[in-house]
Image (tube, rainbow, N blue to C red):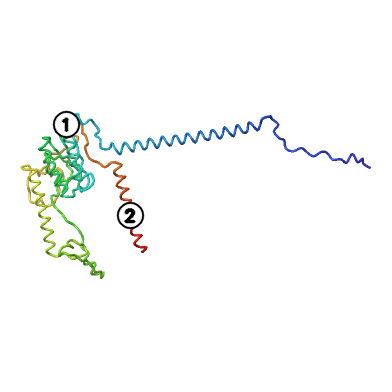
Amino acid sequence: MQDPQDNTSAPASTPSAVPTQPGWERQALEQLAFAALREQQTARRWKSGLRVAWLVFLSVLFWQAFSFNTPTTNPSLPHTAMVSIRGEIGSEGEGSAENVMAAMRNALEDSGSQALVLLINSPGGSPVQAGLINDEIRRLKALHNKPIYVVVEESCASAAYYIAAAADKIYVDKASIVGSIGVLMDGFGFTGLMDKLGIERRLMTAGANKGFLDPFSPQTEAQRKHAQAMLDQIHGQFIEVVKKGRGDRLKETPEMFSGLFWSGQQAVDMGLADALGSLDGVARDVVKSPDVVDYTQRENVAERLAKRFGAAVGEGAVHALRMGSSLR
């Protein structure tokens, strides 16, 4: 028989060991605090870096917006002034009479400019805008007594040549497109197609010719003759400007004023241009001032953003009006 005292079980095992190092709670809190501090410092660095990057970006944008038209060299020194005419000649953009004439005035009023070169690369455009620029070239030549030259890049056709004819000399590349001395008025007529589809054009006018050139109405013979007479008159004005500007240098042929265009070498042979040359060559060899200063009036970033914003606002307003009318 066993002794009751022998049945006593051994004491239960002790729980998992607890850190016995003195001050471990303090060390853990310190580590957590330092980790949080390092995280805050890293976040501050990122914020500071982003702020500096945005500041640099805005500074560059501001500089481009308000210093885009500044000359690249000191205008007071002797130089060749240059004004570029690119793209379609119209009432807006770099090819408008307002921008081109302002740039020409600034260029010739500068005491350091020895001559003005119009760098043209345009297929033509508005005869009204071209006529305004042509008249201004003649006025500025008489006012400032400085030569005005034209240098053609790829093309100088139609209204662009209307402008070039007023210059003292025209320089072209041998492969340039020059000429196209003519006037056109284009459009479409859908009357036959509408008859086949059974569509009736309901146009009401006050005035017998108020619907003149309406593409959905038939054109009368009187209206066609009126339009042709108007084109012939503008064409005659174009021919007169070319003859006045080129003078005895022009070797006139029956095809010269027919609307055809020619290569630069052919234009020189016909008297439509004076010689082969480039911008740098004219500045160096003709003007004798190789430094070229660009006076072209260009739209800066602020103006482009303003136009886009205005267009977006206008589109939104039109869309809102349409939505409002559709809900009624």
Q: Residue furthest bottom?
A: 198
Residue located 79% across and 39% down the image: 12
Quadrant of the frame with the N terminus: top right
Asked whether, in this view, residue 169 is left or right of residue 27, the answer is left
Q: Secondary structure at mark 1?
A: loop
Where residue 233 appears, x then y in whole percent?
10, 54
Where residue 258 appears, x then y in whole percent?
11, 52
Give the residue at mark 2: 317
Where residue 152 appears, x then y in whole percent?
18, 41
Q: Which mark is residue 167?
A: none
Give the residue at mark 1: 111
Q: Residue furthest front?
A: 328
In this rendering, is residue 268 above or below 233? above
Quarter-of-image position of residue 293: top left
Nearest the eye: 145 or 86 = 145
Residue located 35% across and 36% down the image: 59
Q: Amino acid at mark 2?
A: Ala
Asked whether, in this view, residue 135 is left or right of residue 297, the answer is left
- Dot 1 or dot 2, earlier in sequence: 1
